[in-house]
């Protein structure tokens, strides 16, 4: 298995994987530089990405093919994304989730009120339109 930077050639497979989980995918093309994919025999089996909002970022578009769950793929992608973002000057990650709160808590993310989201996060399409208004917002300081 290999983990690598997403390319435009991965876009359709990324959209298909995200759609299989009901996750928004129609706006990721502009953020592809911040996406990591996991591949096995050149078949995309996992993806994660983030959207830059200056010194903060929105972690988003996270999925692993059901046939490969439980193998640590999502954890590896998450660690690579956190490292990539921190190296790009991002100080903290925010995310919105309807179902993965417990998963992200295991990696140091904590719940935050949506009303306290930075303005740059609130302006993202995912925050405004694509995620349900009942989604839990979570936060992690990448500088700690």
Image (cartoon, rainbow, N blue to C red):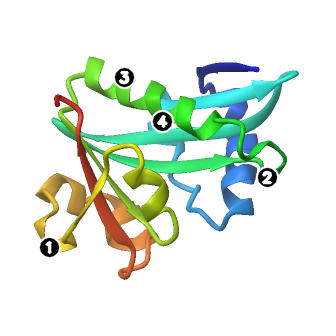
Alpha carbons under labels 3 and 2: distance apart:
25 Å
Pointer 2 or 4: first along the chain: 2
Residue at 68 percent of width and 39 percent of height: 46
Pointer 4 or 3: first along the chain: 4
Q: Where is residue 70 in the image (x, y as percent from the top left)?
A: 71, 44
Local secondary structure at mark 2: helix
Q: Quadrant of residue 89?
A: top left
Alpha carbons under labels 2 and 4: distance apart:
17 Å
Pointer 1 or 2: first along the chain: 2
Choose between 71 and 131: the one closer to the eye.
Answer: 71
Alpha carbons under labels 3 and 1: distance apart:
27 Å
Q: Where is residue 32 in the image (x, y as percent from the top left)?
A: 51, 34
Local secondary structure at mark 1: helix
Choose between 99 and 116: the one closer to the eye.
Answer: 99
Alpha carbons under labels 1 and 2: distance apart:
34 Å
Local secondary structure at mark 4: helix
Pointer 1 or 4: first along the chain: 4
Q: In which quarter of the image is residue 133?
A: bottom left
Mark 1 lies on residue = 115
Mark 2 lies on residue = 66
Mark 3 lies on residue = 83
Alpha carbons under labels 4 and 3: distance apart:
9 Å
**In the image, is residue 115 above or below residue 25?**
below
Which of discs 1 and 2 lies nearer the camera? The answer is 2
Mark 1 and mark 2 residues within 8 Å of each other at the beta carbon:
no
Relative placement, left or right, of 132 versus 127 is right
Q: Position of residue 84 (x, y in %)?
A: 38, 22
Which circle marks residue 78 in the picture? 4
Alpha carbons under labels 1 and 4: distance apart:
25 Å
Mark 2 and mark 4 residues within 8 Å of each other at the beta carbon:
no
Relative placement, left or right, of 77 versus 131 is right
Label 4 crowd (10 A; few <14 / some 14-19 / many >=20): many
């Amino acid at each position: 298995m290999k983990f690598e930077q997403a390319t435009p050639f991965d876009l359709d497979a990324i959209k298909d994987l995200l759609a299989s989980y009901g996750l928004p995918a129609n706006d990721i093309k502009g953020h592809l530089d911040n996406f990591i994919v996991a591949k096995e025999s050149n078949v995309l089996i996992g993806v994660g990405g983030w959207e830059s909002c200056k010194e903060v970022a929105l972690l988003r578009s996270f999925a692993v093919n059901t046939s490969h769950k439980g193998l640590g793929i999502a954890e590896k992608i998450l660690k690579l994304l956190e490292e990539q973002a921190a190296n790009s000057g991002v100080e903290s990650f925010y995310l919105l989730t309807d179902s993965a709160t417990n998963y992200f808590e295991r990696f140091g993310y904590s719940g935050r009120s949506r009303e306290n989201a930075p303005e740059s996060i609130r302006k993202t399409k995912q925050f405004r339109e694509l995620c349900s208004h009942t989604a839990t917002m979570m936060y992690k300081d990448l500088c700690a």
